[in-house]
Image (cartoon, coloured by chain):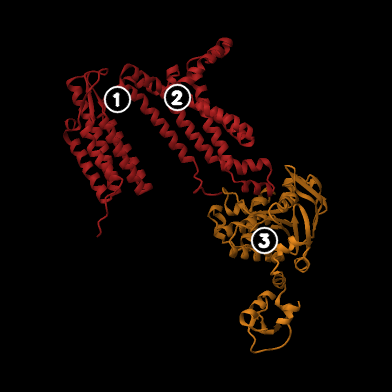
Chain colours: A orange, B red
Amino acid sequence: MIRLEQVRRAFNGREAVAGVDLSVARGAFCALIGKSGSGKSTLLRMINRLVEPDSGRVLFEDADVRSLAPEQLRRRIGYVIQSVGLFPHWSVARNIAAVPALLQWDRPMIAARVRELMALFDLDPALAKASPASLSGGQAQRVGVARALAADPDLLLMDEPFGALDPVTRATLQTELLRIQRETGKTIVFVTHDMDEALKLATQVVVLERGRVVQDTTPDAMLANPADDLVRDLLGREDRGLRRLALRPVRSALRPGEDPSAPTIPADSDCRAALSRMAELAVSTLTVTAPDGARLGLVHLSDLVAG
Amino acid sequence: MRLRPPDPVLLPLVVALGMVPLGLAFVTVARNRLVTGRPMPLWHAAQGPEAILSLAGLALLLLAALKRGPWLAILSGVLVMGGLGWIAGDVAQLQAISQPAARVSLGGGFWLMQALAALCLVEAARQTGRAGKALATLLVAAATASLMMSGTLDDLSLLREYANRRDVLGPALLRHIEIVTLAVAPTVLIGVPLGVACYRREAIGRLVLPTLGVVQTIPSIALFGLMLAPLAALATWQPALARIGISGVGMAPAVLALLLYSLLPIASNTQAGLASVPDSVRDAARGIGMTRGQIFWQVEAQLAFPALLAGLRITIVQATGLAAVAALIGAGGLGAIMFDGLFTGALDLALLGAIPVIGLAVTADLLLRLVTPRATDRAPS
C-alpha cells in the first residue's frame, strides 16, 4: 500500500528523517513510535505530502506521490491529528461531511454517509447540528476520526490521535478504532509515543530514533527480540514479559479439564489478566468461561509461563 | 417573607439622581442667545403637573430600587426623564411669553439627571432581559416623540437653534454621512487586502502595522493640516484634478485623512482575525485536501470575519467623530454647525451639531453590532 524508499528530510540543517525505508501492507495497522524529535510525525506527513522529502521516493499504491496533485492525494487519505482541528464555524455534521463535499458528492449521499458514520462512532444523532465547541474531548476526536473516514479512504494517517485524552476515554477510543479497522480492513499508519498503545493496536511496530528506523517488526517479535537498548527501554525492561503475555488471548493456553475449586476467568481475557488473577487469588489454575457461563476448560500457570 | 436588600446598582443611582438638583443648575436663562445665562435651580423651574409627575417618578424609582422591581424601575425611569423634559420645556415657554429674545438652555443638572435616569433604565433593562430592553426603548422613544410633537420643547434654546438651522441641518447630516462613506468604503477595499498581506508575510506586517499606528497618533487637526499642502500642489500641477474637486481644502483632504486613520483598525483587525485561526484547524484543512483558496475562503476568512466586522465598527465610529473635526478645513458636515456654535459662543448651536454626530456614531455601532455574529452563539451551518 505504501512504500518509502530512502527518504530524507532536513529542517534548518538538522535531519528529521535520515534515510528511511518502510513498507506498509494493505490492511496493516502500523505504529510509528519514538521519542519527541525522532522524526515520526515528519515521516507520517510525507505520505500525504504535507511535508515533501528532500530526497527519496514515497509510493502510494505503487504510484510516486509526487505524480499526484497534493489535494487530490489528501482527499484519498484520511488524516487525524492530536489537536483534532475541527472547523469551529461548522456543525459536527458539516465537519464530518468536509471531504465528501470537497469531492462534490451529491447531498443525499453525503447526508446518508454522515448518519452512517455518527452511528459507527456511537455519536448521538442530536449532535449533528451541534457546534464543535460543545463537544467533550472524546466526542471531538470521534468526530475527527469520522471526518477522516468520511470519503471511505483506504488509508488512514493518525498523528497521536488519542494523546490529549484521559486514560479511560483513550482506552475506549482505542478499542473502537481497533473494531472499526477489523470491520473495514483500512490500512492505518499511526504515530504514538505510548508503547502500550502501539502494542495494543498495531500489527507492525516501527521504532524510530533520530530519523532512522531502529526496528520494524510485529509486536510479538519485538517483545521477544528487542533490537537494542532503546527498544528495550521503550518496551520497559521489567515488564516486557508481562506485555508479551498481554498480546496472547487466554484461549491460546486453554487445556481441557475441570476443577470445581478453580476461580473463573472470561475467555476473551488475555494471558496477563489470567496471571494477575492467579497472583491476586493465590491459585495456579483458573477455569475459562464463555460469555454464556459455559466452562470451556482450564488454564495453568505453567502454560502461561511456558508461552 | 424574607426582606431582600435594596438593589446595589439602582439605589446609588437614584440617590445621586435626587442629589443632583442641590448642586447643579437645571436650566440657564439668558437675555439673548449670545450672553451667558443665569442658572435656575430645579425647584424654581418645577411647576404644575409636570413637577408632580417627575416627583412621583422619582419616588417610584426609589421604591423600585428598594424593593427590586426592575419593571417598575423602567416605567418610573421613563416618567422621570419625560417629566424633566416637560419641566424644561415649560420654563422656556413661560420665558418666551415675557421676553421673546430670552433663551432657556438645558443646564448641567438637566443633562446629569437624564444621564442617571438613563443608567437606571439600562440597569433595569439588563435585569429584565430582552422584553425589558424593548419596553424601555419603546417608552423612551414614545416620550421623546410626544414631547417633540406637542411643541412643549419648541421654546428651548436648542430647539430654537434647530428652527433657525432646519434647512442646513439635513444637508449637513447627509454631507457628514458622505464624508464617512467616502473614507470608509475605500478603506475596506484597501485595508482588508493589506491585513491579509500583513498576515501572510510577517515582514509586511512588521512594516505596515506600526506605520499605521504612528498615523493614528497624529492629532486629527495636524493630519488634516498635513493634507493641505500636497493636495493643493497636486491640484495646481494637474488642473483636471481640481475640476473634479481635489484641492487643499474641503472634502478631499478630509476624506484622505480619515482614510489614513481608518486603515489601522481595518488592517490590524483583519490580520488579528486571521492570526486567531488555530494552527490545528489550518493543518486539518490542509490535511483533508483543501486547496489554498478553499482554506482561505471556507475556513480562514469565515473565522476572521467577526474580527473584521469589529474593526469596521471601530472605524465607522471613529470616522464619524473625526469627520466633525474635518469641518475646520472646510469639509462641511455636522462639524460646521458645531464649530459655528463654538466660535460664536452659542453653545446650543454647538450642541445642535454635536448631538447628531453622537446619534450617527451610536446608530452605526448598534447596526454593526446587530449583524456581528458572536463567536459563542453563532448557529453553525
Residue type, label 1: Leu
Residue type, label 2: Ala
For mark 2, name the chain: B
Q: Cα distance, mark 2 to mark 1?
A: 22 Å
Horizontal side of residue B133 vs B238, given as left or right: left
Q: Position of residue A35 (x, y in %)?
A: 69, 56
B352 or A66, nearer to the observer: A66
Give the mark toward the camera: 3 or 2. Answer: 3
Residue type, label 3: Asp
Give the mark toward the camera: 3 or 1. Answer: 3
Quarter of the image where the N terminus of chain A is located: bottom right
Q: Is residue B112 above or below residue A106?
A: above
User: Cβ–Cβ below 8 Å for labels 3 and 2?
Assistant: no
A266 or A60, nearer to the observer: A266
Tag 2: Cα neighbours inside 10 Å, few (<14), some, or many (≥20)? many
Element class at badge 1: helix
Q: Cα distance, mark 3 to mark 2?
A: 63 Å
Element class at badge 3: loop
Q: Which mark is residue A20?
A: none
Q: Which residue position holds label 2?
A: B323
Quadrant in the picture for residue B331: top left
Tag 1: Cα neighbours inside 10 Å, few (<14), some, or many (≥20)? many
**Residue B39 visible:** yes
Q: Which residue position holds label 3?
A: A194
Q: Position of residue A3 (x, y in %)?
A: 81, 54
Q: Cα distance, mark 3 to mark 1?
A: 77 Å
Q: Which residue position holds label 1?
A: B158
Which label's residue is closer to the chain start, 2 or 1? 1
